[in-house]
Amino acid sequence: MSPTIWDTLANTPWWIYPLYYYLLRTGYLATKSRFVPLRTLRLFTLFFVLSTFALLLGSQQLSVTKFGLWLASLAGGALIGWLQFRLMRIKSKPQEALIRVPGNWLIICGAIAMIIIQLFKGYDYYLHLAQQVAPIFLSWLPVVYGVLGGIFMGKLIYANRCMKVGPYITS
């Protein structure tokens, strides 16, 4: 039997609520056009790619096939991220190492979806996700991790390209 919403709220650790506030605040701010330092994008990309590799190592025994799948999906994700930034018409300020990113509702929608899932499924759903997923889907985790990490790599590649050859913001 699934826990009620009140049981879930009562059994959720206290530190989750500031995290939800941060996610919702970040999602709201992301709906508006903003300038992002290239340094932040580099650090976030490095963290995300390394964490997907660590998840790959921790979730399954690493084999050459799984590592190859991860690398191939990393390349595919990089193409998706590059195309996403290109279609969003990202522009840069090379003097200040900033890129202008238009508003996007994806982050706040994802944060709200995570909160709703947590309320209806319970906090343990996230902690024991591997037990919730069928074994056939676990074999696809390297691909999912690679695509997600690759998206950030592709965005970083396009942002670096914008710093060198444009398009630039004229202000």
Image (cartoon, rainbow, N blue to C red):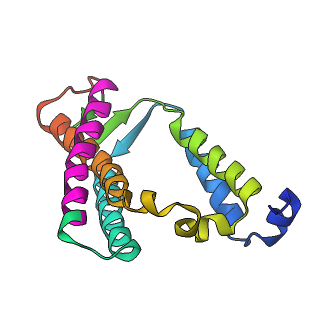
Residue 67, by quadrant, is bottom left
Could you tell me residue 32's position as x and y percent? 52, 31
The C terminus appears in which quarter of the rendering?
A: top left
- Give whichever of 169, 63 is nearer the camera: 63
Residue at screen point 35% across, 57% down: 145
Does 156 appear in magenta?
no
**Count of numbered marks:** 0
Q: Is residue 88 magenta?
A: yes
Relative to 72, 151 lies left or right:
right
Residue 132, percent from left and from top: 59, 63
Q: Which residues are magenta?
A: 66-89
**What is the x, y in percent for residue 8?**
80, 64
In this view, the residue farthest toward the left is: 165
Q: Magenta stretch: dominant SS? A: helix
Comparing 142 with 48, the one in front is: 142
Q: Position of residue 163 (x, y in %)?
A: 18, 38
Q: Quadrant of the N terminus?
A: bottom right
Question: Going 48% across and 30% down the picture, which residue do you hit?
Answer: 103
| Pick the front one: 169 or 40 | 40
Q: Which residue is located at x 40 percent, y 72 percent? A: 59
When the figure is inspected, residue 149 is found, relative to residue 101, above or below; the finding is below
